[in-house]
Amino acid sequence: MKILKYGIGLVAAASLMTSCGNAGKDKSGADGALNKNNAEKVYVAPGEHDDYYAFISGGYSGNLLVYGLPSGRMFKEIPVFSQFPTNGYGYSEETTPMLNTSFGFIPWGDSHHPDISQTEGVLDGRWVFINENNTPRIARIDLETFETAEIIEVPNSAGNHSSSFVTENTEYVVAGTRFSVPVPQRDMSIKDYKGEFKGALTFIGVDQETGGMDIDFQLLMPGFNYDLSHPGRGKSHGWFFFTTYNTEEANSLLEVNASQNDKDFIAAVNWKVIEEYVKNGGGTMMPSEYAHNVYDHHTHTATSTMKKEVRTINPTEVPGAVYFLPTPKSPHGCDVSPDGEYIVGNGKLSTDLTVHSFTKMEEAIKNKKFDGEAYGIPILNFDDIHAGSVEKAGLGPLHTEFDDKGNAYTTFFISSEVVKWKLGTWEVVDRKPTYYSVGHLTIPGGNSRQPSGEYMFAMNKITKDRYLPVGPELEHSAQLYDISGEKMELILDFPTHGEPHYAAAIKADVIKDNSRQIYELDENTHKHAVKSENETRVERNGNEVHIYMSTIRSHFSPDNIEGIKVGDKVYFHVTNLEQDFDVPHGFAMIGQKTSELLIMPGQTRTSVWYPEKVGVWPFYCTDFCSALHQEMQGYIRVSPA
Ligand code: CUK
Ligand code: CUA
């Protein structure tokens, strides 16, 4: 394995080209992947369960994937921000409101960073939050049903990237804008960006009983790019840290424009101070349209509400609310150590990692030792807050996670490796190649007070030769490492789906016993549900026909329907009467352009059909549900208008 020589040609190397060559093609021995003992480490015997759930972002698929560790098996794709043909999410009448926004219905999204809810800094397994980057939204996925329960749009934001990380009691899920934009939006010259555009950092309150989200306030910051964020924890609970780049406020980010400043900032936000300010009536309600979509698993129906205003905060009006920590070279990741003391800024154009000390930061703030200000926000002195640097660690650092033994693990995109280093002494203790060009990495609980010390996995941007070739488009590769020893050991390659920008992983025990198996029929309050076959019927109301249908092994009721005319609008309200785990039924209608359905036991789903052709048309169940599955069918007679 060749190690790149650092320090030379940094600017050229840092031109963000991928350089995979040094990671090598040696698949034998060197990385330990062929070691038989390693095969045992990831072997989960047939019928056995994995030790961890990993919730892996689907990136441009807009969804969230559920994997098991250490096996690397994929168990589920949870549709979140994109229509999903498999079960009709975003197509069926009940679920289309989930994709409503102030821009109207958006069929697909770009999901980035999942984060699991916490109590006292420990993952509690109630919910996973994930951000949509493109049309800014935050979703909450319920870990009882593994369904998207809620999506809230984030107004005044654009490129919702610095999201969706939670504070240590899930008081807030936080969403920071990547692009600064005119706030409120208006027609103006792009060249007048500087000083005019604003960056919204949004604090969304979470109801601890229901999980319900609501925007508490939006901090309107100077017009930088806000890239990633992390909550304080333990001693730094009450703070939130955001990396910034383009503090030059260039309107075109060709490298010359945006990378002039030797240092950008980490913005340290004291949300407790702002919370107090808001309690005392602070802030300004600003007209802002944003959708709030809630799915209820009793009515099995989503509703979308358009909100009209949001509370905005001018940071300079709240003393003690925001400080800038100078951080070299366009930092990307922003990660806080499990004890809350260290704030790691990964300057992606640097070879060094900069670590700030929370204690020193507090001290400097107390002594009012500032080094000027930016737009009225005090800038701290780099030397006053600097805890240490990991020097010449690699090229293109992106993200850092932590284990339970005082080590940190940082990904390097350009030199394509994970580097393990010690908190406090800043020495590099190990480095391992990734295949290839790693983005994020995940340690179960790595974003909490209690990380695990067993596994780490790297999510790579480039796959090339790792799997059988399948044409130009490849799934991204992930690599699982055993981190229980001093040296990391590569133990598994596994494909991911879309582009995983992050993953949150948790001990399986915390959630698996809570996982729901069916929806109770008694509790089904869908307004078109039937409780038994006796209630199935066809109702006409002018041109609208409602077919109240049931499924149970192995027939539809009704299964012969007449009296439908060309030009009608036909609703199929299909209730699955099954009350057994894992017996869904499907519904597919010939020529239908709206939604196929997959209906879970106890659930009701609706699809709309516009009959266009006279004839007798079949429908059938798409899910092989019993030995008589092929008998599960019906006909609809369509007569002339
Ligand atoms: S970003 Cu993708 S590698 Cu969206 Cu977290 Cu850094
Ligand atoms: Cu129901 Cu096949």
Image (cartoon, grey):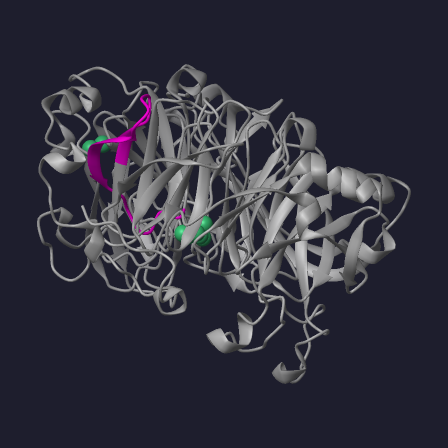
Front residue of 169 and 269: 269
Find the magenta span and give its range.
480-501
Q: Quadrant of the N terminus?
A: top left
Q: Where does the image place residue 433, in percent across and percent down from the top left?
A: 25, 44
On screen, residue 359 versus residue 461, left or right, reads: right
Q: Where does the image place residue 306, in percent across and percent down from the top left?
A: 65, 55
Q: Quadrant of the C terminus?
A: bottom left
Q: Is residue 481 magenta?
A: yes
Residue at image position (60%, 60%) is: 264
Residue at image position (34%, 42%) is: 418
On screen, residue 422 versus residue 626, left or right, reads: right
Q: Where does the image place residue 159, in percent across and percent down from the top left?
A: 53, 61
Residue at image position (29%, 28%) is: 487
Front residue of 173 and 286: 173
Can I make out residue 585 in this image?
yes
Q: Measured along the vertical axis of the image, is residue 259 above or below residue 141? A: below
Q: How many marks?
A: 0
On screen, residue 249 versus residue 402, left or right, reads: right
**Which of the 4 quarters of the picture holds residue 610?**
bottom left
On screen, residue 223 versus residue 477, left or right, reads: right
Q: Is residue 234 magenta?
A: no
Front residue of 607 and 473: 473
Can I make out residue 111 in this image?
no
